[in-house]
Image (spheres, helix red, strand yellow):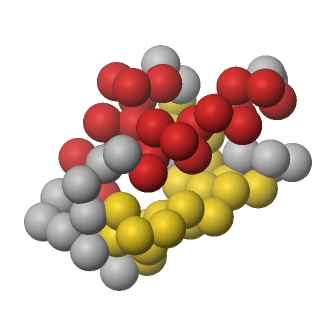
Amino acid sequence: MKYEFLIKTDCSACLGIIPEFIKKIDGVKSVEFDLNNGRVIINYEGGLSRERIIKIIKEKTGYEVQ
């Protein structure tokens, strides 16, 4: 399953570390990340809903996720 998100931040250095947090979520197989626009595509094989993954990313990074 693929999930696509937009992560809002103005800090390009911060955007660089966000994929590392996402990779630690159980079931995440790969993360594609576009530093230019904050778009993230996650290949996921697990039991968490899209909404739960958004909540985890927000909790781990402190950034707004859509």
Label total for image? 0
Residue 22 can be seen in this image: yes
Q: Quadrant of residue 43?
A: bottom left
Q: Nearest the camera: 28 or 55? A: 28
- Residue 11 pos. (x, y %): 79, 22
**Quadrant (top left, top right, bottom left, bottom right) of the N terminus:** bottom left
Who's the residue at 49% across and 68% down the image? 30
* Left or right, 25 with reference to 10: left
For residue 24, above or below residue 64: below
Residue 51 can be seen in this image: no
Who's the residue at 34% across and 24% down the image? 59
Who's the residue at 30% across and 36% down the image? 55
For residue 20, above or below residue 11: below
Who's the residue at 30% across and 58% down the image? 50
* Left or right, 12 with reference to 64: right
Q: Nearest the camera: 21 or 61? A: 21
* Left or right, 46 with reference to 23: left
- Residue 40 pos. (x, y %): 60, 56
- Residue 28 pos. (x, y %): 36, 62
Identity of the residue furthest to the right in this view: 36
Q: Nearest the camera: 54 or 19? A: 19
- Residue 33 pos. (x, y %): 68, 56
